[in-house]
Amino acid sequence: MNRRKFLFVSTTATGALLVGWRMAAAQARLPYLGAREEAQWVGPFVRIESNGDVIIGARSTEIGQGVKTSLPMLIAEELDVDWNRVRVEQLPYGYIETDKGPSNKYGGQGAGGSDNIPGGWKELRQAGATARALLVQAAANEWDLPAEQLRTDNGDVIAPDGRRIRYGALAAAAAALDPPKDPPPLKKPEQFRIIGKPTRTVDAREIVTGRAVYGIDGYLADALVAVMVRCPHLDGTVEKVDDSETRKVPGVKDVILVEGPKPDASLFDGPLASGVAVLAENTWAALKGREKLKVDWKPGPWTTESSGALAARANELLDKDESGVSVRKDGDYARARKQAATRLDARYEVPFLAHATMEPPGATLSVEKDRVVLIASLQQPGGASRIIHDITGVPRDRIEISLPRSGGGFGRRLENDFVAEAAIIAKAAGKPVKLVWTREDDLQHDYFRPFGIHALGAALDKKKRVVGWSHRCAATPRNYRDPGKKGESIAIGCIEAEDFPAYLVANLEKTFYPVASGMPRGWWRGPIHTFHAFAVQSFIDEIAVVTKQDAVQLRLDLLGAPRKIPYKDYGGPTFDTGRMAGVLKLAAEVIGWKDRRRDGHGVGIACHFTFGGYAAHAFEVSVEGTDLVIHRAVCAVDVGRAINPLGLEAQMMGATIDGISTALNLAITVKDGQVQQHNFTDYPLLRMAQAPQSVEVHIVESTEEPSGAGEIGIPSVAPALANAVYAATTVRVRKLPLMPELKRML
């Protein structure tokens, strides 16, 4: 618990008990801004109505990772209520001003890095426990009994003689009490009745019946619909606009120029590209008006950039071995390599990737003199608040942000360029605006996962033990023009000092070679781990094949005895080799790793530590003609104590399918300084016929503190698939996406 925070307790006009965390400042309520439901007042984090109904506020942005269910489960557990009587409501962004600066009355509300569960594990349980303690004290006062003699059960306070009082009857009295000076004790795990139980998504019925409210459903009275045409050239600008035909389109109301970032490497802290916005009474008129625009573009400084040139430059840097930035150096790799009985080298290429969320970016926004209202699917509402303030000048405590469910995030909504566009357009128009992005807008103007080539080297002694390891990475730096990465290592997001096999190989070198590019870069699901796991885990398989070792046993030998070793990067502070070995052995056992296949099938395996969790994938595949058939897909996962096993299973299924889709088919390419992909015709997501019939998820039971699960299920997918393809065909794919390369090599 942050020492600057403290509990507050209050009551509503109806006598409901409100319990939550906040900073030392007056609580300001924000209205519900959704389009389809009647407004309801929900306090931070708990409201208990006089009839006994319990409403729990979900604080973090829901992008499909299940936190709208799992985080309220933490509160409900300690509150000791019947989950079937709990209603969950999404909280708005909770910005507050305090005497110590800006803060948030709800705590962290973003979604990124799989940190919602670790961040809320103790804090939210404490909120529930405090509410329960207040209700018990209210009952103790009513009965004139010591609170220590009372207990709770499913929304009742119970006296030693069996008398019961429902929470609803105690709510008003409990709200009048001061919170306890010391935090009340939390439940012991053996007392859990909600945590650890498979629990359905709280708004699943609304989702499948089409009633769930997403950001794209945002509505404000008198809002104009805006669409933009953006410069297709990296860092290009608008040279001339002829909007005469556009303004003739029925329903078109205005045309507004939106300036993008300067083509001088200034930071991406607003719109991502220069463009022209068309405002109309409805989406159709706005799109037709955009078609009529005549815009002359001035290309930027990256007109010669192409995917081929980037690959050539990366290989050149690796060949010359110059201008590298040392990331880690243990022992003496050069000496170990010179003395080695076996030496291996291989290079692996990973492409730019787009996020391609099912709901493209967009925002509904109103700018008034002293008030801004935003409705959007977000991952970083704090960043949206800051950028709106910078553009409009409206104080942040007068910026109201609702947080509807998002149609996917994967890191795309950590950036708020679409919010900046909406703020600029609404400010210029003097009317509320609903900015709509098309799929083409989305794929052409993303913050792409970096492109890179990994050059790996290994030295083995006469006993086939890995005694030296070299990992050199030439890539487009992730921190390019990112204001949040000022002062960070240029290698961040591409190669990290503490990642595998740090501390496991005595002689280890890691080096980064920056490759200049004008492509905007951002975080993509499981960022660093999806970027390098393909190379590292594929290379281990290559070592096993060349040295005639079992690939699972080789990994186990590298991990060594179960122990916790330092891990300073995100997801630490330690890496547990025993837990990693556990998921690896479980996946191998389930897939039947030691069973000999005689039917043309091949089995591949890979494992990875990501953001505090451990996962392994195993696939059984065959290649029929030029088609890859995935016969089995196995995922073993250890996230510590699972809050909602049903949600965890769904996360691993989704991540596995996402990983397969990405590994097989997806790449963003650039030519003449322009992104080449436009829609799903040339950025083809996995089709149902290509997918495995099922994903077999096996969850390790654990008493360790929980980690998040939104990203750990994807890094080991691509290498496990590539290793399975090799086992089935003896064709080693070292370049993603896998299918185009496999077809080329067969």
Image (cartoon, rainbow, N blue to C red):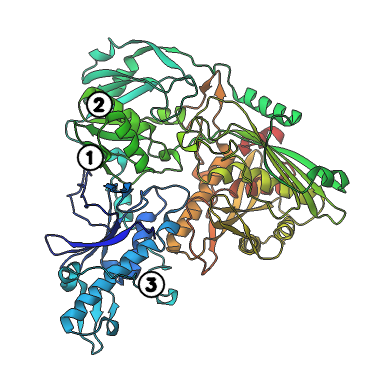
Given the image, on which type of amino acid does mark 3 rest?
Answer: Leu
Residue type for callout 1: Arg
**Dot 2 surroundings within 10 Å: few (below 14), some, or many (20 or more)?**
many
Q: Which quadrant would the N terminus be assigned to in this image?
A: bottom left
| Residue 699 shown left or right of residue 555 in the figure | left
Between 553 and 108, the residue placed more toward the observer is 108
Q: Is residue 176 left or right of residue 264?
A: left
Looking at the image, residue 610 lies above or below residue 642: above
- Of the numbered discs in the image, which one, if any, rests on residue 427? 2
Front residue of 395/682: it is: 395
- Residue 136's tag is none
- Label 3 crowding class (10 Å Cα cut-off): few <14, some 14-19, many 20+? some
Relative height, residue 159 to residue 321 (above, below): below
Residue 186, numbered label: 3
Left or right position of 268 against 630: left
Residue identified by numbered label 1: 398
Kind of element beneath mark 2: helix
Give the mark toward the camera: 1 or 2: 1
Going from N to C along the chain, the mark reached first, 3 or 1, is 3
Marks 2/3: CA–CA distance: 49 Å
